[in-house]
Amino acid sequence: MTEQTTVTNTQANQSKPAQTPPYPTAAALPTQQAPKNIRFDFNEGCRVHLPLLEETEGTWRIELTDLDTGNILFAQAGLSQALVRSSKRWYVRFGITVWQDHTAEDGKVTSTQVFSHAYDSKDKQVLIIFPVGTLGDTLAWVPYATRFAEVRQARVTCAMSELLIPLFQNAYPHINFVTHDDVRTNKLTEQAYATYYLGLFFDDAACDWQPSDFRLVGIA
């Protein structure tokens, strides 16, 4: 899988106000805490926030991998501060490794691994968001969400239309069903370890939101 990961210099870039999107969006900063004030999560892809290092503290080096294929998806050094995020928003079992590099006067670089994490959603809060305004699509996709909860042993919350929730609540008591408004009101995105969006993404030519063009595969 080819990964075009985005690295944002958080000192130089400021987010611009945007219109309310059709899906609840991820929290501004990754939700999971790590050593050295690093933050990470898997909401809207793999995201890693590297806090500012003083010049005397060296620089960050980061590597993202696909744990199932062994491929290195992204690697970059020389970062003083950054928000790294994968372009792919769908399920990938990511691995994250971060080093702190120090360069001596003679040019020799000493690296210290400060953080490593392998995706594991067991007992974690996972948010799966369905579109509103559709019936057949949601009926087809809900069993996949519940299967994810069972296989990954995750604490799954499914966000969907309020009209559809009564159809599923009794059949899947181990799943928390909420509306999109519930997600925003209760700030569920700020608690999630991972978030996945189910839908038909017509303009997703790069397949960032879905593994394949939905027009070439079955809906279920």
Image (cartoon, rainbow, N blue to C red):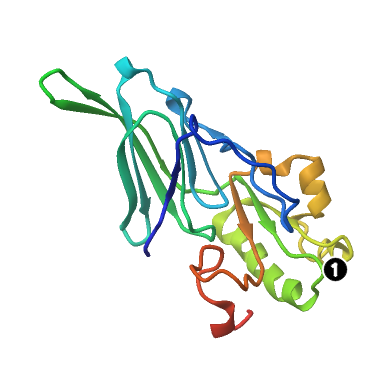
Residue at 44 percent across and 26 percent down: it is 35
Horizontal arrangement in the rendering, residue 188 relative to residue 103 (left or right)? right
Q: Within the image, what quadrant is residue 30 found in?
A: top right
Residue 4: image x %, image y %?
A: 40, 56
Residue 19: horizontal and vertical position, in percent?
A: 74, 50
Residue drawn at point x = 79 percent, y = 53 percent: 180
Q: Residues within 10 Å of mark 1 (few under 14, many from 20)?
A: few
Residue drawn at the location 30% of the way across and 22% of the way down:
58
Up-down relation of residue 127 to residue 131 (above or below): above
Residue most toward the top? Answer: 56
Along the viewing direction, whichever of 15 and 168 lies nearer the viewer:
15
Q: In this rendering, is residue 139 above or below 65?
A: below
Q: Secondary structure at mark 1?
A: helix
Is residue 144 visible to the viewer in this orientation of the structure?
yes
Q: Which residue is mark 1?
A: 167
Query: What amino acid is labelled 1 in the image?
Result: Leu
Visible residue check, residue 217: no
Above or below, 198 against 76 in this view is below
Q: Residue 141 at x, y = what percent?
A: 68, 71
| Quarter where residue 168 is shown | bottom right
